[in-house]
Image: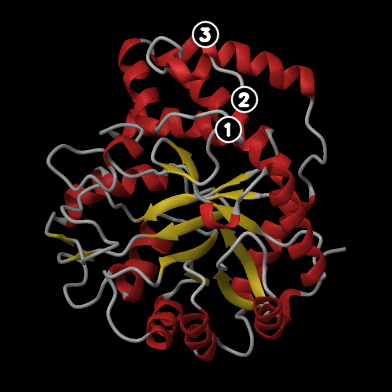
């Protein structure tokens, strides 16, 4: 039976090193975050990583503690060779789609499966992927080759295949960056992107992609200012974007987390960033860098109890996590590696390399 999540806090925290310290464990014990996110700084070997995820779950008392990572492939990869094989950015599947859409979708499925199988080995259960943003020309490089395409059709086909592959390997996918980051001309890690595109155009393009994935159990916001929707508030702090666009128009009903609240697109102290995110409509606050003083400030802003809607969404995700396979089929995995290498090896030679 899943544990009662009413005692959990609507937050996901990172931590600073390859092991979680006594101070961090005590902080997590006091704050009871819904989940934990990992980065390259937390990884040394696959054995160490599996021991770490086991330790985190044991310390939480929750065998299904959500443990997340950003493992898209390409430049967004926390696990890298020689620990795992190299995986391409989504743009590689996009190139293949322009030649043979059917083969590209098969390759995206197999790539998602193999990538997620590595995460499954490590005890990671949620991948903050795929990136569903449009890959448009003359925009910030923050998205670029992370996008599966520049149009609704190609992104929908390739991303759905990738998601299905991850699901086969027992890892949940996450839709990001709602309601769309593809029109940012600056990097939201360092400053606030301002999008002046009309809502009608956004509705037919950026929003349409996310509407096709409104069935996913998890999503992440992007930190942008959509002037035609709410010229006063960054999207993560905007009830208009959160409620009217993401929840109502796009129809996303899953568990919705903020993007990292330590990003410089946001202003204010960390407590106010967390508070504004939740008040606007996020279910969860994401804080990544493991800075204890920042995490303590975030924790100060967290409510003492969860809303019924957030609690129900958490239960849904944890139910899905509990149903994932404990062991993957080794022969199927080997065959997938061979087939994937044949499909993408000409444009991504690393696909033919063994770990």
Q: Is residue 259 left or right of residue 108?
A: left
Residue at disc 2, secondary structure: loop
| Residue found 51% across the figure and 47% down from its top | 78
* Tag shown at residue 201: none
Q: Which residue is mark 3?
A: 342
Q: How is the image coloured?
A: secondary structure
x, y (%) of residue 342? 52, 8
Of callouts 3 and 2, the N-terminal one: 3
Residue at disc 1, secondary structure: loop
How far is disc 3 from disc 1 in space, using C-alphas? 21 Å
* Tag shown at residue 82: 1
Q: Which quadrant of the view contains residue 47?
A: top right
**Residue 172 vs residue 140, the one in the foreground:** 140
Of callouts 3 and 1, the N-terminal one: 1
Name the outermost residue toward the right: 1
How far is disc 3 from disc 2 in space, using C-alphas? 16 Å
* Tag shown at residue 355: 2
How far is disc 2 from disc 1 in space, using C-alphas? 6 Å
Residue 81 higher or lower than 48, as above or below: above
- Mark 2 vs 1: CB contact within 8 A: yes
Residue at disc 3, secondary structure: helix
x, y (%) of residue 188? 27, 61
Residue 332 higher or lower than 135, as above or below: above
Q: Residues within 10 Å of mark 1 (few under 14, many from 20)?
A: few
Q: Which quadrant of the view contains residue 14?
A: bottom right
């Amino acid at each position: 039976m899943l544990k009662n999540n009413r005692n959990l806090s609507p937050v996901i925290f990172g931590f600073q090193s390859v092991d979680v310290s006594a101070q961090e464990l005590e902080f997590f014990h006091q704050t009871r975050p819904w989940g934990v996110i990992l980065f390259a700084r937390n990884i040394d070997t696959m054995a160490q990583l599996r021991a770490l995820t086991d330790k985190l779950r044991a310390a939480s008392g929750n065998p299904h503690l959500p443990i997340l990572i950003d493992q898209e492939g390409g430049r967004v990869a926390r696990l890298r060779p020689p620990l795992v094989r190299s995986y391409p950015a989504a743009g590689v599947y996009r190139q293949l789609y322009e030649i043979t859409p059917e083969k590209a979708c098969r390759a995206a499925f197999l790539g998602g499966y193999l990538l997620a199988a590595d995460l499954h080995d490590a005890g990671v259960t949620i991948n903050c992927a795929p990136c569903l943003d449009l890959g448009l020309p003359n925009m910030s490089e923050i998205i670029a080759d992370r996008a599966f395409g520049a149009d609704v059709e190609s992104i929908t086909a390739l991303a759905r295949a990738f998601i299905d592959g991850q699901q086969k390997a027992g890892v949940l996918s996450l839709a990001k960056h709602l309601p769309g980051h593809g029109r940012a001309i600056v990097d939201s890690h360092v400053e606030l992107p301002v999008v002046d595109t009309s809502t009608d155009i956004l509705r037919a393009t950026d929003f349409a992609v996310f509407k096709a994935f409104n069935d996913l159990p998890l999503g992440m916001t992007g930190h942008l200012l959509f002037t035609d929707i709410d010229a006063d508030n960054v999207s993560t702090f905007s009830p208009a974007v959160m409620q009217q666009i993401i929840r109502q128009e796009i129809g996303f009903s899953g568990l919705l987390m903020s993007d990292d609240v330590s990003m410089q697109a946001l202003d204010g102290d960390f407590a106010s960033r967390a508070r504004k995110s939740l008040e606007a409509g996020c279910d969860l606050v994401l804080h990544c860098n493991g800075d204890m003083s920042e995490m303590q400030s975030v924790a100060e802003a967290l409510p003492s109890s969860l809303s019924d809607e957030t609690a129900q969404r958490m239960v849904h995700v944890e139910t899905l996590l509990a149903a994932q396979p404990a062991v993957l089929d080794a022969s199927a995995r080997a065959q997938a590696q061979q087939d994937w290498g044949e499909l993408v090896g000409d444009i991504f030679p690393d696909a033919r390399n063994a770990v």
